[in-house]
Image (cartoon, rainbow, N blue to C red):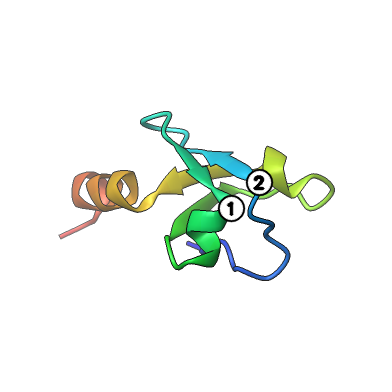
């Protein structure tokens, strides 16, 4: 799964996790916080669907084939 890159992210942007609903700021992404892209929107990047690192870990634990 792709991770949101710092390039093109502005500090005033905000991104919402599709699982827990937490809002991650553009500033946090620029400083190194990971957001996983669940569904990308090339025309409106902020309208893409994201998952925070914590929820992504939970998702992988639940759906990872053993």
Which quadrant of the figure has residue 59?
top left
Label annotation for residue 26: 1
Residue at the image point whose x is 21% and y is 44% from the top: 62
Q: Is residue 5 left or right of residue 66?
A: right
Q: Is residue 23 left or right of residue 11?
A: left
Which quadrant of the figure has residue 34?
bottom left
Dot 2 falls on a residue whose secondary structure is: loop
In this view, 55 is above or below 8: above
Which quadrant of the figure has residue 66?
bottom left
* Among the two numbered marks 2 and 1 on one chain, the one whose residue lies closer to the N terminus: 2
- Outermost residue, top side: 21
In this view, 9 is above or below 61: below
**17 or 13: nearer the viewer:** 13
**11 or 19: nearer the viewer:** 11
Mark-to-mark CA distance, 2 and 1: 5 Å
- Outermost residue, left side: 66
Q: Are marks 2 and 1 in contact (CB under 8 Å)?
A: yes
Residue at the image point whose x is 24% and y is 55% from the top: 64
Residue at the image point whose x is 31% and y is 43% from the top: 55
Residue occupied by mark 2: 13
**65 or 4: nearer the viewer:** 4
């Amino acid at each position: 799964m792709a991770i949101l890159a710092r390039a093109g992210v502005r500090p005033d942007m905000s991104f919402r996790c599709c699982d827990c609903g937490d809002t991650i700021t553009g500033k946090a992404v620029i400083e190194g916080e990971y957001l996983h892209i669940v569904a990308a929107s090339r025309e409106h990047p902020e309208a893409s669907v994201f998952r925070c690192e914590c929820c992504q870990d939970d998702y992988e634990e639940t759906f990872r084939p053993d």
